[in-house]
Amino acid sequence: MLALADRWLGRYTRALDMLSGLCLAIMVVLVFGNVVLRYTVNSGITVSEELSRWLFVWLTFMGAVVALREHGHLGTDVLVSRLPAPGKKVCLVLAQVAMLYVSWLLLKGSWAQMVINADTEAPVTGASVGIFYASGVLMGGSAIAILLRDLLRTLFVPLSDNELVMVQESEELAALQHRTEDASAPPPSAGPRR
């Protein structure tokens, strides 16, 4: 069951990753085009600012979903890393339950705002403002799915010590990158034999 969830969540986050790239590309074109038009012909793309803002919000929430799936958020493990394995597991379960609750609040609040603003039109594009708040619905719902999968894995699958501390620290990332570069470098030559 978890393997199937992993496969679907992997495909889903890859799609969100590609959509995030598309949002970023559209934002760059809109903002750059607007700057060039304002500078050269003293005119601009009317919807550029509003659409760029909406795309930025969507990009942020989609990127947060991808980072949550990959456990890419930064954190600190000063206390948790010193605990024995059962203590680490309890802390991980508590953290996942707390994140599930916060994700539920985000989903519930975003849904309410989406419904309230469904008939409100954006000033420039005329699109429903509910679309803006739908990004929070996507984030909340996606986070709940990812966190439920992680919680089930924590409760029912034996995890290694490193998996019980799901934290990415900047120093760890730098050290990992350094080790990867060292491993991929060709071995030093010993010189000619005599």
Image (cartoon, rainbow, N blue to C red):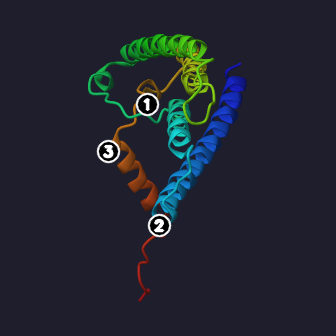
Observer-nearest of 96 and 92: 96
Q: x, y percentage for residue 81?
A: 32, 26
Residue that mark 1 sits on: 162
Where does the image place residue 9, in percent across and percent down from the top left?
A: 66, 29
Is residue 66 placed above or below 33 in the rendered structure?
Answer: above
* CB-based contact (under 8 Å), mark 3 and mark 1: no
Location of residue 124 (image quadrant): top right
Residue receiving disc 2:
185
Q: Is mark 3 on a helix, strand or loop?
A: helix
- Measure the C-alpha gap from mark 3 to mark 1: 15 Å
Q: Is mark 1 on a helix, strand or loop?
A: helix
Q: In which quarter of the image is residue 85?
A: top left
Q: Are marks 2 and 1 in contact (CB under 8 Å)?
A: no
Q: Quadrant of residue 7?
A: top right
Above or below, 95 against 193 in this view is above
Q: Name the residue under label 3.
A: 171
